[in-house]
């Protein structure tokens, strides 16, 4: 049942699409994805590049990375030892392509009235 109380709508079926929409709604996250690209980037490398064009705090970056990770778009590649402090996280893309056909891939919603 959806948030509007429609019994024919199974919100769980839409979940896989919604996680991507939620994670990708923010332009900063697209910049992070482009920065990581085909390789890997540490949190500091991403932060250093982002601060050239974005007004973003380090905690803001951690938030965006965690949202992308939760959606399965980025993942932790490794920890990197830096200067004897806490190990630094290194990220890579987990999902490089998202495809779905709006006419055939979405769940059936026959009788759906909102």
Image (spheres, grey):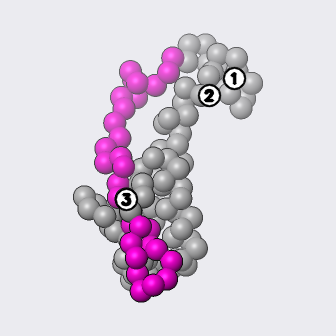
* Marking on residue 37: none
Q: Nearer the viewer, residue 24 or 110?
A: 24
Q: Nearer the viewer, residue 39 or 25?
A: 39
The magenta region covers 79-108
Q: Quadrant of residue 84?
A: bottom left
Indicate which disc, 1 or 3, sits on the residue closer to the N terminus. 1
Q: Where does the image place residue 97, in percent across and percent down from the top left? A: 31, 44
Q: Residue at x 40, y 29 (%)?
A: 102
Q: Are marks 2 and 3 in contact (CB under 8 Å)?
A: no
Q: Which residue is mark 1?
A: 1
Q: Which residue is mark 3?
A: 77
Can you tell which of label 2 and label 3 is closer to the viewer?
A: 3
Q: Quadrant of residue 100?
A: top left
Q: Residue furthest left?
A: 38
Q: Residue furthest front?
A: 84
Q: Are marks 1 and 2 in contact (CB under 8 Å)?
A: yes
In the image: residue 57, left or right of residue 53: right
Q: Where does the image place residue 26, in percent across and percent down from the top left? A: 49, 59
Q: Residue at x 53, y 59 (%)?
A: 66
| Numbered disc 3: secondary structure | strand
52 in magenta? no
Image height of 83 relative to 79, above or below: below
The quadrant of the image that shows the N terminus is top right
Q: Which residue is mark 2?
A: 11
Q: Residue at x 74, y 24 (%)?
A: 5
């Amino acid at each position: 049942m959806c948030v509007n109380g429609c019994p024919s709508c199974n919100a769980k079926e839409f979940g896989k699409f919604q996680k991507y929409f939620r994670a990708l709604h923010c332009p900063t996250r697209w910049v992070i994805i482009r920065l990581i690209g085909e390789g890997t980037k540490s949190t500091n490398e991403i932060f250093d590049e982002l601060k050239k064009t974005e007004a973003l705090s380090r905690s803001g970056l951690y938030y965006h990375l965690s949202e992308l990770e939760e959606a399965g778009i980025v993942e932790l590649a490794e920890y990197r030892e830096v200067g004897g402090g806490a190990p630094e996280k290194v990220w890579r893309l987990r999902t490089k392509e998202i495809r779905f056909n709006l006419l055939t891939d979405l769940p059936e919603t026959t009788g759906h009235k909102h």
